[in-house]
Image (spheres, rainbow, N blue to C red):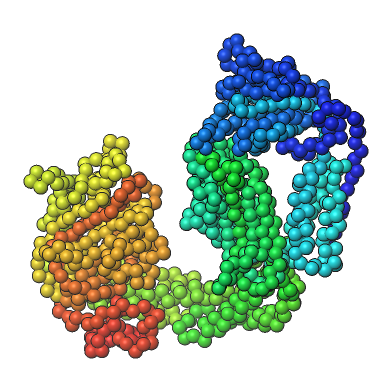
Amino acid sequence: MKRRIILAFMAMCVAVSGFALENGEFVYTPQGRFLIIGANVENNNFADLSGWTAITATEGKTLEDLFIVADNAASSIDATIGEGMYYKFEPTDASATYVVSYKIKGPVATSIRKNLTAVTGDGKSTTTNLANVVRVAGNTDRVYGSTEGELIANTGEELTEDWQTFSYAIQGDGTSRTWFISFTGMATTISIADLQIAPAIQVADLRQRDAMVEKMEAYKNCYEWSKNLLDDFGFDENLEALKAMGDTNSQDELVEVINTCQEIIDDFVPRNMDDFLTGNKANYLGNNLGKISNGKLGDWTNFGRAYCSSGDYPDLGHYQASNTWNNGSPDNPMGVSRQFDLPAGSCVFSIESRAAVREPGCKQTWNLDEGMRPAYGVAYIVKINEDADPDTIVSVVKDLQPINYTPFVVVAKLEADGQYEIGLKTYCKDTHKALKVGSVTYVKDARIYGKNDNKYNQAQLSYEADVLEQISTGSNALAKAAEYLGSSEYFWGKNDLKASVEAVTPEVEKYEAYTQDQIIETFDANAYVKDNRTKTAEEGLLVYEVYVNAVRDILAANKKFEAVNDTLNSMQSVIDNAEAALAMRVYDAAIGKEALKVAIEKTRDIQTAMKATDYSEENVAAIKAANAELDEVIETFKTTIPESSIAEIISLDFEQGAALNDETGKYETTGVNTSMEYSYFSETTPGTSSDLPFEIGLDKNGEKVCNGVLRVGNGSGTATIPAMDYGTNILKVSMDWWFVRLTGKYVGFDLVDENNERVVGLYFSPYDGTFASGYDDFALDACDGNIGNNSISKFFIGNTTGDDGSCADNNKTHMEAILDYGEKSMYLVSITPNGTFTSDKVEFNCKVPTQFVVKSNYTNYNGRRCWFDNLKIQSITAGATEPITGVETIKATDKVNDGAIYNLAGQKVDKDYKGLLIKNGKKMIQK
């Protein structure tokens, strides 16, 4: 595993020069670190303005009109945008490298990035030049201002009242160019001096070397690793090679050694240390976090607020112009933290951050290229104490840059197990606290690794747990198979299941005998991926071997066994549905009862015959055919209620549209024995988001679509119901719905009595499965498989594509509310393309409704409405019955063997109740 040490020596030619950029001098630039290898090829000390050319939009303006020279420095007379001067440089070698250097000074907290920002008396900033203030640009046109060619701009320099030297590298690529060094839009408070250009070569950037040395030493020194372990990874050799990188090495040599060291860290750390953030990308403060809310970044707490778009690193709060740092709280930090329960041992916490005060002073520019250097960061590890103040274990302070991320590496020795806070806080420097130009901080790549004296690290223990989980899965699957084989409830496929059990049992027993050492000996950090442990990436590892030999086949055998018996058991479900239909009082008057009973017995005979056979495609086909035949008889039975037993109370289908009632001043729709009046109605689709009336159809591009259907708006539509005595009959209220993108909005209906009190109501959000407070009268939230947790497709069909096609049959929910005045119970039936669902029965107050109300609470448009149609209310004759007392909805799992008696609707009944009942999970007939 040792890495080859990469070293080289490079001879340099050195000559003596009296210029400021001296031969042999090392210079840092934004492009890296360079060695000056000769005398200045150009030099201008501003004794006068010779060599410079005026840049002006005003004809006749001269250099003397723009600049004043004093003490070998040039200062601006007029900071007009786009005006200034340039110096022309013609390299003699198009492939050579040169360093451009100059001196500049100005007020504190003024930046000379691409845009020059001057700070006014009230602390705000003013952009004096929308072009580049300092610009080093080359082009083959040899004309100033051409956009072709290379551009080298400043990198976040901030001025001081003392002279500072800034340098840039011109790296030739063989293409002949003229280079222009320009200063434009300079404020009168800024001066420049001593422009120089000298030949150079790029050498190793020791800032990069030092950053990697810090990282390598953090992991090496955090724990007393054995020499053999370090030697195995080539750790010390390559660390010393990295430290030896110096003035005689090229940047390419340094990059090669840095890459080798990074490979060592990437290999060494996961193999030997616990990763406390593994398994959650959001923990790493990397990209793809999505938009952040509630002050959280994954499992991290954010100080202030956070804005993070997919693909970006977390933005801890971008505060716009007219605000000082941190939205007007310059003494408070921005940052992130997270608390952990950590074991005693060594801990290495690393994180990167950058920060900037925004330039220019406007609300629209958010480019970090315009930033200053306003902030410093503090990375820390703190011990949380229950009865005392927190103890700071360690902290590291560094300045933050506007473009390049500053890395923090924090090493701590944790003396005891406990709760620790790990985080980064960024603070505004005193020199920038008064600037009202906005601010921003970014963070990325948080990593927390630990090492204690345990024999195995977290990754190895996690691997062991996954192997044991696979073994346990195989063992549990065998137990389930044995349960199936011994059960009298399953009839098909037992020979195949038994064969699988016999094959897998010895494999499970073999793996159950493995020790911890034997399991972890098979661990390979490069191949093991927890989220992928049963896929091809894990081939060759024990975790995958166990899955293949002791898990996969028995799981498949159980699944097949369940599937073939589900087909057989589906006959019982259809028989139950038929018997339940026979027992429903809404069909008391149906004349097709005898035909349904005959069909039930026929299906039961087929069921008995099938139980005596085994699985085959022919038997499956026969079962499906029998089920379909009985389903058809059930549906036919439901239609055999004589017309004389059904009294139509009201009917309303909206085909006739709506008309304005001159007496009431409101629109209304007339139907059979009723009319519906709207609190807010329009004949055309509203044009604004606040204009949300009911309407008939949809006005789209001047044409009506979905005619004859009511589009529900904000408010209510109220239909009258003639008052009558229902005796022991059943009131059936049926309607059709189409739900369209109802995020956070409620729709529903009420039945209201003559005192304007609710008889029954349902007011719900089909999109997210929630009910308005007090409006779940059918106890839908307690029904098995019903709404809740966005799982609404069984009961309500919702369309998310907008208005087009929203009234199609494949998006329709037909709803029936059944109110039984004889049994004093009620339930809801939903019929959708996904099937029919019937809720549990609940107690009914037996009040008489006089109004039907359809309503919603729309507050914005955005296509989020719904449709309503085919309202029909009927009274269906049902015979007298003993009312069920103490109606109680019981979950199926609670009522299997409790000794109580239930009807087929799942309701507990009195012991002397007559009919088809269930006791201890078995059907019985009580006469």
- Say which quadrant the N terminus sits in: bottom right
Taking depth in this image into account, of 883 and 249 the one nearest to the observer is 249
Q: Is residue 486 left or right of residue 835?
A: right
Q: Nearer the viewer, residue 314 or 753?
A: 314
Left or right of residue 609, residue 583 in this image: left
Residue at left 83%, top 51%?
A: 242
Find residue 623 and report its image quarter: bottom left
Outermost residue toward the top in this view: 60
Q: Measured from the top left, where is residue 38 in percent x and y?
A: 86, 29
Residue 445 visible in image: no
| 301 sits left or right of 544 in the view | left
* Residue 851 on image: x %, y %: 15, 60
Residue in the image at 82% along x and 64% along y: 230
The outermost residue toward the left is: 663
Q: Position of residue 634 (x, y in %)?
A: 29, 70
Q: Where's the C terminus, which quadrant?
A: bottom left
Quick check: 192 above or below 613?
above
x 79%, y 22%: residue: 42
- Above-or-below relation of 253 to 599: above
